[in-house]
Image: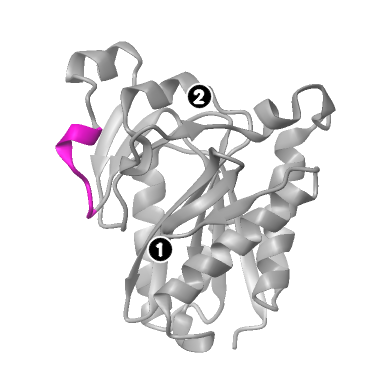
Amino acid sequence: MSGDLAVVGLGRMAYEDALEVQRGLARARIDKAIERDLLLLVEHPPVITTGRSFQAKHLPATPDQLAARAVALFDVERGGDVTFHGPGQLVGYPIYDLAEHKRDLHWFLRQIEACLIQAVASVGIVGTRREGLTGVWVDDRKIASIGIHVKQWVTWHGFALNVATDLSYYDLIVPCGIDGVIMTSMQKELDERAPRDLWGRALDEVMLAFAETFGQTPQATTLKDVEALLAH
């Protein structure tokens, strides 16, 4: 099992650019050109993505409505239905070789849920699972969505944790294809109890939760440093 976890902070990056980055790194992980797992942490401008289970009725917004709110649209290879990414949302792309952990996709999804439940618990939010549904909930409200892709046991795509997200964007979709779902955020749940630097706290706690859950040592690195490894 890989003992080190390279945590790569991408800042705010366009979805298509981050998609290209993670696909490239996943190929390198498959080819063993990168010998440790990676966790990419990023914030995106407004974008809606659709996955392999997408149903058109779950995206009722018209192209004009999306354009009016400057929301991009991408169809990608991840599992799941339709979801939103945008400012104030922490998106994580774990590029893990499950052959070094456990060759079980459902196990990996449950591990990601455990990471996010641990992260929100650090600021006093009680996150839970819902049987038959992937993601993390606070009572009847959904705070985090998960959708991954795996090839030769290497994963990419990942999770979206609402930290201080503008939840009105979810009116454009049926989130994750779940009728009647109510989306929430860490900021909304905490309100006046929120730490001053909630975003920074969320970043730190997610990184620590992944390292602890998968028994790894987190090492903050840059995309440039990771790409330099590929040149050798």
Q: How would you rate the neighbour count of disc 1 (Cα within 10 Å): few for under 14, some for 14-19, many for 20 or more?
A: many
Residue 191 visible in rendering:
yes
Q: Earlier in the sequence, mark 1 or mark 2?
A: 1
Q: What label does residue 3 carry, if any?
A: none
- Given residues 217 and 98, the one toward you in this image is 98
Which x, y percent locates residue 155?
A: 41, 69
Label 2: element kind: helix
- The vertical placement of 9 against 61, above or below, is below
Which amino acid does the dot numbered 1 rest on? Trp
Q: Which residues are magenta?
A: 52-58
- Residue at horizontal 65 percent and vertical 65 percent from the top: 210
- Residue at horizontal 23 percent and vertical 31 percent from the top: 59
- Residue at horizontal 29 percent and vertical 47 percent from the top: 81
Label 1: element kind: strand
- Does the stretch in magenta take in 55? yes
- Does the stretch in magenta take in 57? yes
Q: What label does residue 167 carry, if any?
A: 2
Which amino acid does the dot numbered 2 rest on? Leu
Residue lying at the far top in this picture: please name it. 68
Residue lying at the far left in this picture: please name it. 56
Tag 1 residue: 156
Which x, y percent locates residue 72?
A: 30, 29
Mark pair 1, 2: CA separation: 25 Å
Q: Position of 12 compared to 64: left or right?
A: right
Which x, y percent locates residue 53?
A: 23, 53
